[in-house]
Amino acid sequence: MKRYQAQDISFYITNVCNLTCNHCESFNNFAFKGHYRWKDYQEVFRKWSEILSIEMINIHGGEPITNPDIVNWAIGIKELWPDADEYYVSSNGTLLKHKIETTRQLVNLGYNIDIVIHDPEHRQPVLDSIHKILEHHDYIIDDEADPVKNRHEYIDKHTGQNLMSIEEAFVFRQNSINEIKDRVIHMHRSDPVEAHRICFNDVDEQCWGFFKGRLYKCYLTGIAEDLVKQFDIEPEAKELLLKYKPGWPYDDEKTLDNFFENLPNHLEQCTLCPDFENCSNIFPMPNKKVKI
């Protein structure tokens, strides 16, 4: 059986986030709903594990710690991909104080809780949570891992496991929303090649993700199905979003070959994202979700 290779893949397990960051690429500043359960997709992922090797695995959201099924996701993923080089859970860190035991379970399973702070005021409470979670670990802190992002890594002295990490991202680039008019979301009409180039300026070679068992090139295409069900998207953008064909492990080899060969390339859906750099601070954050 032919086997495909991926450097980095995220497992998107929820649309829900407790924060309201403006320009969130996953639309989590809206009242976006939807937790996903591991058991609903485990057989699809079992099939994926037979044909796809992954170097770095990331459990993502939304805020994945909000999903009450996160531990089952973590266990299931490691059982199917036991040889990945790294395992992460991406978090904003603000809910860890309420999830101490759950976070300890994730760390003990071999996951690095990779925290990105989106407001300077969050940093000290998150640091307090980290120290509580790791109180039974013997670790060192690497505070020079990335000085630009003010990244600190908590490394087990005996095993070398990166237990937790924390860095800062206080600025977001504009997302795919051009405007909201009469409660309808209107997206950009950009040069897709340039929009794709800008999108990948500050990320590694890929940002592929699993959404409900299917493999997508990016977050916008991945959340599209839920997005158009929960929000009013202007017709042309809606049609374009739903036109995208994700990867499916039961497809024939020719279809899968074509899918993986084209993953690095721009999509016609890239026109919905901006083809210009426009970044802005995301704090202080609104207290309530955007309602449309």
Image (tube, rainbow, N blue to C red):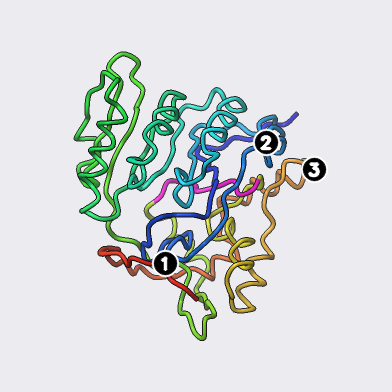
N-terminal-most mark, 2 or 3: 2
Q: Could you tell me the amino acid type at mark 3?
A: Asp
Residue identified by numbered label 1: 289
Q: Is residue 93 above or below residue 71?
A: below
Q: Residue at x 51, y 65 (%)?
A: 193
* Labels 2 and 1 touching (C-beta < 8 A): no
Q: Is residue 254 left or right of residue 221?
A: right
Residue at image position (19%, 35%) is: 144
Residue at image mark 2: 42
Where disc 1 sits, the SS reads loop
Q: Please state the horizontal and vertical placement of residue 40, each as a whole percent of the image.
A: 68, 42
Q: Secondary structure at mark 3?
A: loop
Residue for point 21% across, 53% down? 120
Amino acid carrying mark 2 in the image: Gln
Residue 248 on the magenta segment: no
Q: Assess disc 3: are there few (<14), some (14-19) or many (≥20) residues with their C-alpha within 10 Å of its C-alpha.
A: few
The segment highlighted magenta reads 203-212
Residue 280 horizontal/vertical position (percent):
29, 67
User: Observer-nearest residue: 34 or 160?
Assistant: 34
Q: Quadrant of residue 229?
A: bottom right
Q: Is residue 112 left or right of residue 280?
A: right
72 or 120: nearer the eye?
72
Which residue is identified by label 3?
Answer: 252
Q: Is residue 92 above or below residue 283?
A: above
